Image: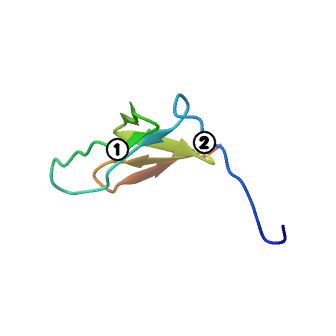
Amino acid sequence: MRGFFVMEVSTEESKIMVNSKTNTSTDITMNDEKLEEVTSFKCLEVTLSKDGTCTAEVR
């Protein structure tokens, strides 16, 4: 079938982060499993925080 793609997502490795200046949280479930909510996330040497701030590691 042309244009048909399947994506598998691991609920054990998936996490969520709500970006807000107020203390906001949420519950997201996938396949009847609640995803873990984190307060910060590191990607490409930059740490993004729940409050919208970010810091970069300089080498």
In this picture, residue 8 sits left or right of residue 54: right
Query: Which image quarter is the N terminus in?
Result: bottom right
- CA neighbours of label 2 inside 10 A, class few (<14), some (14 to 19), many (20+): few
Circle count:
2
Secondary structure beneath disc 2? loop
Mark 1 / mark 2, whichever is N-terminal: 2
Position in image of residue 30 (x %, y %): 44, 41
Q: Residue at image x 42%, y 53%?
A: 54
Q: Residue furthest front?
A: 1
In this picture, residue 44 sits left or right of residue 25: right
Mark seen at residue 48: none
Position in image of residue 27 (x %, y %): 28, 42
Mark seen at residue 9: 2
Q: Is residue 52 above or below residue 2?
A: above
In this picture, residue 37 sits left or right of residue 3: left
Q: Residue at image x 16%, y 47%?
A: 23
Mark seen at residue 28: 1
Residue type marked 2 = Val
Position in image of residue 50 (x %, y %): 32, 48
Residue type marked 1 = Ile
Position in image of residue 28 (x %, y %): 34, 44
- CA neighbours of label 1 inside 10 A, class few (<14), some (14 to 19), many (20+): few
Relative depth, front residue between 1 and 22: 1
Relative depth, front residue between 49 and 29: 29
Q: Residue furthest left?
A: 22
Relative depth, front residue between 12 and 4: 4
Secondary structure beneath disc 1? loop
